[in-house]
Amino acid sequence: MKVELDPAGIRDSIALWRDAVDLKLDMRADIRSHLIVMRAQILERFSATAGSWQTVLASCTAEDEDALQLQQLKDEVDDFKVWAHENLKVLADLAKE
């Protein structure tokens, strides 16, 4: 079976989600407050989403130059999951103080 993958969609989601949760986007004050209050839960869901993407991408194969692009996408998803975990650790450390 051949399946078409939209790497740009995954990359766009990662970029938007990171910028939103890091408060780098212009947004209404109530949305900003929501992202601050719900940061841990949002990061947990980002990690879960990255895990799902990792599962799907692990079963994908590509040929020729697409193999390099697929590996780059896998690396970007791995980095996104690490970023979510690192930010969760920061929050956990702050809660201990």
Image: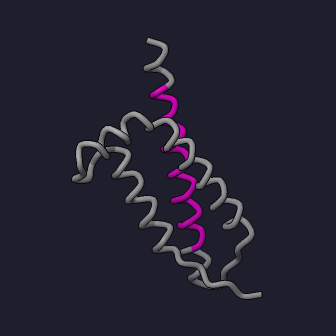
In the displayed image of the protein, which residue is found farthest to the right? 1
Q: Position of residue 72 (x, y in %)?
A: 53, 67
Q: Position of residue 12 (x, y in %)?
A: 42, 67
In the displayed image of the protein, which residue is found farthest to the front? 30
Q: Nearer the viewer, residue 25 or 67?
A: 25
Q: Position of residue 31 (x, y in %)?
A: 31, 46
Tell me if residue 89 is in the magenta stretch: yes
Q: Is residue 53 left or right of residue 46?
A: right
Q: Which span is picked out in magenta?
A: 70-91
Q: Quadrant of the N terminus?
A: bottom right
The structure residue drawn at horizontal position 56% and vertical position 59%, both measured from the top left corner, is: 75
Q: Nearer the viewer, residue 39 or 30?
A: 30
Secondary structure predominantly adopted by residues drawn in magenta:
helix
The structure residue drawn at horizontal position 66% and vertical position 80%, both measured from the top left corner, is: 62
Q: Nearer the viewer, residue 9 or 64?
A: 9
The structure residue drawn at horizontal position 37% and vertical position 40%, both measured from the top left corner, is: 34
The structure residue drawn at horizontal position 66% and vertical position 67%, both measured from the top left corner, is: 57
Tell me if residue 58 is in the magenta stretch: no
Q: Quadrant of the C terminus?
A: top left
Q: Position of residue 20 (x, y in %)?
A: 35, 51
Q: Nearer the viewer, residue 76 or 40?
A: 40
Q: Is residue 71 left or right of residue 34?
A: right
Figure disc tally: 0
